[in-house]
Image (cartoon, coloured by chain):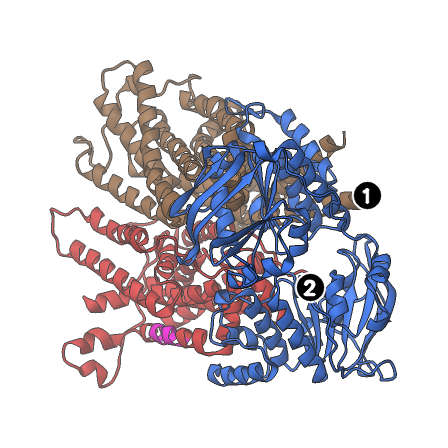
Chain colours: A brown, B blue, C red
Amino acid sequence: MKERRLLYQLLLIRVATSFFAVGLTLLVGAVFIVLAGSDPFTAYYWMYQGSLGSVSIIVETLVRSTPILLVSQGLAVAFTARLWNIGAEGQLYMGGMLASIAAIMLQGLPGYSAIPVILLLAGLAGAFWALIPAVLKAYYEINEVFTTLMLNYIALYIVSYLLVGPFRDPVSQFPETQTVSKELWLPIMIQGTRLHAGVLLTVFIATPVVYFILKKTVFGMRLDILGANPEAARYSGVNIVKEIVLSLIFSGFLAGVAGGVEVLGIQHKMRMEISPGYGYTGIAVALLGYLNPVGILVASLFMGGVMNGSSTMHRMARIPVGMAYLIQSLAILFIMVGYLIQGKLTARLFERLEEHRPA
Amino acid sequence: MGVTRQHHPSFFCGEDIEPRVLMKDITKIYPGGVVANRNIDFDVGRGEIHALLGENGAGKTTLMKILSGCLRPTVGKIIIDGREVRFRSPKEALKHKIGMVHQHFTLIPSLSVVGNTILGLEEKGPILDLEKAVGEIEALASKTGLPVDPRASVHTLSVGEKQRAEILRLLYREAEILIFDEPTSMLCGSEVDSLFNTLKQLASRGCSIIFVTHKMKEALAISDRLTVLRAGLAVATMSRSEASEEKLIELIIGRVSYPLAAPKMFAPALARDVLVVNDLHVKDDRGSLAVRGASLTVKEGEIFGLAGVVGNGQKELVEAIVGLRAPIKGSVHLDKAPTTGSPARFIMAGGAYVPADRLGRGIALDLDVSLNSSLKKLREKDFARRGLVNKSKIVEFARRVVKRFNVMTPSLDTPVKFLSGGNIQKLIAGREFETVLRVLIAEQPTAGLDVRTTNRVYQSLLELKGRGVGVLLISTDLDEILAVSDRIGVIYNGRIVAVFSASEATPQRIGAYMLKGESDLESR
Amino acid sequence: MIAASIRLVTPLILAGVGELLVERGGILNLSVEGMMLIGAFAGFVVTYFFGDPWLGVLIAALSGLALALLFGLLTVTFSLDQVVSGLAFNLVAIGATSYIYRATFGWYVSPVPPHVNRLITDVRLPILSDLPIVGSALFTHNPFTYLAVVFILLSAYLLSKTTWGLNIRATGEDPLIAEYLGIGTYRIRYVLLALEGTLAGVAGSLLSVSQYNMFLDNMTMGRGYIVIALIILGRWMPGRFLAAGALFAFIDALQLRIQASGITWFPHQFALMLPYLTTLLALLLVGRRVKGPAGLGKPYKRVR
């Protein structure tokens, strides 16, 4: 059927431009590697080895990708409605903080009952943190870019204060909380790796849920309309306030859960270093995946792979660890180019279709 | 409409004078293959008012865009005052003293008249001398009889004043060949008369005026010569004395055929009130009261036409009825259900709305045709059960919408932004007609549509009447309102000042209410 | 403390003037943050290796300019979404500067970060700075502060009293009509962006080479975004923007004072938070439903 073919063609354009963007990124990354005095082929070889070299390494890549994936799935929902939630980082921190506090308070309770509660609380913390900008935007039309960003810094400072003050681990000399008790750690699914339950939660529950929401529910369609033309949304009876608030707090919720997952699954305590910018990487990944949950899954694996591989790259080819972030940033830049090309190709596609149509 | 024929002393003497503007053998083919103009010859003399007639899509606007520098012809030449010219931009055309007054004004609302007038003039030095310009504009305004306050911000002006500002801008730049594109579409009654006076004045001072319109009566009233375009060809050029309505109709072919049957009410005595608007007070964007206690009712199976000069509160009234703007006082009931201030409730109670601002409001450009068609159906049970979307239902409905007014689209998944403007209008109109259950609010529903689709719209309106749907028709085209409505109301200064039945309504009475809020023709 | 406020606010005003003009021209440029950061980095690196802070500032200006032109390419010529582009640039700026910083100075940031010794020094205005009380506070500053004030005055004059200003405003309100009247909207936007890039680069370099003497990751800490918020609060008018900036600078100076004064009961994190909190509150109180130039943020593509 003609319509099917059209959809495939559109998909092809998207995938092709994504690959193009990634390719360009690696290319420019290679330039930077050369600048750092190394050989790009060796460097990339080790990056590949470090991210996909063996099963256990692939698992580790998966583990690294998890927080990014979780955050960006949430952002996809907000971004679909063109609500730019820059505050995922702050929401993540609030989530992680509350998770560690809850974990300490719920000490002694069995894991299977306490862990879901803790994660839920973490999510709620993130959702709450996103609620303020959401309300400001919904009722007062205050641009969410600034409000979420300001709250980012505020969140970081609040957490920093809490970590040296009231919730500091009395035993440690670093600003961090007590270690969470073992029963409350996210259970490891495959022995010998760091693959914790949170990874499965993210990949097998969160991703399909977001996909379902965006593609199959009326809520998702309303977000689509809101993002494309807010006036048309109002005119067709969409409750704009409700949509804005719900989508923003949903993205905050997932970011908060990401914080909680990192606390319970990886760090086992709350520290300032819990996130190397996952909130911001999430933005990049959401855009790279064209706001499609499946694309985001792939994109976050890519980012996770880059992060994982870069430490190997560092050990073996003496490339600075910062390379990972550079590659991530370059990827974002080249997505923009990708969007451009995608737009042009799509327009050309429809132009050609229009010409062939009988008048 | 009270357009009277007048004879005016004409500067224009006839064909023995060298034409000022000569367009020879103009052909324009758009990329994609559409031939908009085909071998057209067109000329205008000094001091002549030349009407360019034809239905929507005949090629008038294209031809004038070529003359005014917005487009370049594929083939053909333009000769001004005996010299061949080639324009690459409207600015260059202006250097040859050609300027166009557009149907939708090209003034920037937040700037002042004087700001708009001197915008883009190269001769002005880096420093703005507004005072001097103000003086110059005032002098020009009084000389040509176009009173406008140069210091006023454009968004505060009435439609007539905006048009005057636009004309003044051209005159300020010493334009002598003026093209007017459907200038009366937003005017009424005496505003049209004053425009015509201005045109005659300008012609008598030696300006060449080209008057693009699809309204024959106006063309016959004002012009020295008329040219008819049809399907891209210039089918005839004649002087006013040679022209008559019948001849012109024959040439233009495809007159809008208003439904001939006398509009009958749907079981009038039993017809319920299906839309009740009670004492609405609505504020506009700037905070002043635009609607001051407007009330009206629409019965089922009737078409209620609302006439009024643009700017008397129609926009805010419609927005309040549909729910997009909350009134500070008053209520709206649809079939006894209160819907004030909520578009969702308006839709659920069975209301539909064809907005005048179609692209801004009625459609989401980046989304595809099927989603846009079902924009308002998402609440319904078949389309969305328990929050889940039923894709096949959407597609089926979209097909119906597309078929209603024959929208040309490669597929239902095409993003709407790739459709042509006319097709987008058709899509929106089709969607509203398909989804209406009790009341349809139609704002300028036939604007921008070609003749065939316009007729289909009128047919559909009749269908709706038969189904018992009430229609509130807001239009600046008084002919349309008179031909189609069962009852006609006039809005003036935010109030409904008069309501007539179709039999009582005459253009004079309505015109009086539109302009003055009262009529001395009333015997009461 | 007034002196401190003025010193702190200079980069904001400098970058803000550029952004204000660009926004009046219709482009919402979120990448000010990135331009400032790259300026800070470039200025620092050049000063470190060549010893001359003025050279640093110059290179910083040029790098800001380059970035702005690139941004212009994406948003003006290619009409891409301005918000997304701006965010992307900022993320790239953070990544690139952190990377190159480590590449240049060592992969591990030592406890004592590299610093420069020569900074942009203050200039005493003759006569004026000898005034009692206010003299040294107001009139002994680095030359860029004076430059910033001059720019504010210039831009106010530009917008309201010159034809260029009229053209800029028209471009920001409705580029379609402006283009129709023969105004080169693309050219105006590029020129304004170039100006903004240069100023933002300089502003950023002031952070690393005047206020402090080192470079830190993400040194700008959201200041670019704050600039845009201040513009909104100032309703896109230069004078009001200056006032908003002054208020913000006061809070910022206050916050530093609190930290320095050694008050122990008030956690220093809360002090650091103050600028952001204030901006948030200000937006809440004053920034409701404000609309800028009608065409702000909307992609515009010439049709021919």
Task: Give left or right: position of B146 versus B98.
Answer: left
Which residue occupies the foreground of this view, A82 or C70?
A82
Q: Does the magenta stretch include residue A165?
A: no
Helix, strand or loop for disc 2:
loop
Instruction: Indicate the amino acid at tag 1.
Output: His
Q: Where is residue B126 in the image (x, y as percent from the top left)?
A: 51, 82
Disc sitting over residue A356 in the figure: 1
Q: Where is residue B518 in the image (x, y as percent from the top left)?
A: 51, 61
Above or below, B398 against B447 in this view is: above
What residue is at 71 percent from the left and 71 percent from the top? B179
Quarter containing the N terminus of chain C: bottom left
Tell me, for residue B72, which label it has, or none.
none
Q: Alpha-carbon neighbours of circle 1 within 10 Å: few (<14), some, or many (≥20)?
A: few
Dot 2, how many residues are within 10 Å of its Cα: few (below 14), some (14-19), or many (20+)?
some
Q: How far apart are marks 2 and 1 (CA)?
A: 34 Å
Asked whether residue B25 is in view, the answer is: no
Dot 1: chain letter? A
Residue C93 shows in the view: yes
Which of C43/C88 is in front? C88
Marker disc for residue B182: 2
Q: Nearer the viewer, residue B146 or A285?
A: B146
Question: Where residue B285 sits: x, y (%)?
Answer: 44, 56
Q: Give the quarter of the image for residue A352.
A: top right
Find the magenta span and give its range: C147-154
* Quarter of the picture holding the C terminus of chain C: bottom right
> Same chain, marks 2 and 1?
no
Which of the 4 quarters of the picture holds residue B403? top right
